[in-house]
């Protein structure tokens, strides 16, 4: 009886010790393009696990191809973006993909994609880990979904 109590107490204590056991994804969403044939974009928040991770690729079942990018302001105040080969996800830290910053460009979006539906983002990590994240789709002019 005492041994069972100790195992239960240890499990409860471990469950309460800081954050998720691995990277998780929250608040994933996709903005459809304003003009058919142009790229859409995906956003989400990565919540770091107990050790650092590296995101190396994102794909989406709504698009033929996806690329990670980061928006920036260049020389002369010109807005632009650069591709990202990988994104560091520090331990126990949020890494945000949001308008005006890091994002995933979605190319050749399925023409049957509709706002209000949920599609899947697949996030691949350098350690071989993979996360499937449901992403709500919104129209180009709509505000982000409220989570």
Image (cartoon, grey):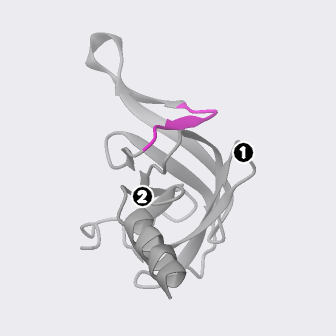
Secondary structure beneath label 1: loop
- Foreground residue among 125 and 116: 125
Q: Would residue 76 be found to the left or right of residue 119 on screen?
A: left
Q: Is residue 31 above or below residue 39?
A: below
Residue at left 49%, top 47%?
A: 50
Q: How crowded is mark 2: few (under 14 residues within 10 Å), some or many (20 or more)?
A: many
In the displayed structure, does residue 141 sit left or right of residue 110? Answer: left
Residue lying at the far bottom in this picture: please name it: 1
Q: Quadrant of residue 18?
A: bottom left
Q: Which mark is residue 127?
A: 1
Place of residue 129 in the rendered image (x, y in percent of width and height, measured from the top left): 69, 55
Observer-nearest of 54 and 51: 51
> Residue shown at 27%/70% (left/top)?
142
Direction right: furthest residue: 128
Q: Position of residue 72 (x, y in %)?
A: 36, 27
Q: Is residue 124 magenta?
A: no
Residue 29, can we see it?
no
Can residue 110 be seen here? The reply is: yes
Q: Mark 2 points at which residue?
A: 44
* Residue with the most extreme front position: 2
Which residue appears farthest toward the top when viewing the image? 75
Which range is magenta? 83-91
Crowding near the residue tagged with mark 1, few <14, some 14–19, many ≥20 C-alpha atoms within 10 Å: few
């Amino acid at each position: 009886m005492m041994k069972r109590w100790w195992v239960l107490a240890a499990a409860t204590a471990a469950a309460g010790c800081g954050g998720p056991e691995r990277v998780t994804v929250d608040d994933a969403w996709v903005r459809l393009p304003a003009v058919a044939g142009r790229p859409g974009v995906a956003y989400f928040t990565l919540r770091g696990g107990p050790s650092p991770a590296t995101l190396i690729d994102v794909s989406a079942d709504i698009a033929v191809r996806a690329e990670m990018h980061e928006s920036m302001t260049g020389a002369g105040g010109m807005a632009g973006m650069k591709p990202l080969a990988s994104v560091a996800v520090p331990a126990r830290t949020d890494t945000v993909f949001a308008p005006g910053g890091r994002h995933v460009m979605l190319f050749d979006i399925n023409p049957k994609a509709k706002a209000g539906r949920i599609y899947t983002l697949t996030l691949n990590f350098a350690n071989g880990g993979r996360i499937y994240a449901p992403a709500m789709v919104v129209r180009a002019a709509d505000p982000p979904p409220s989570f």
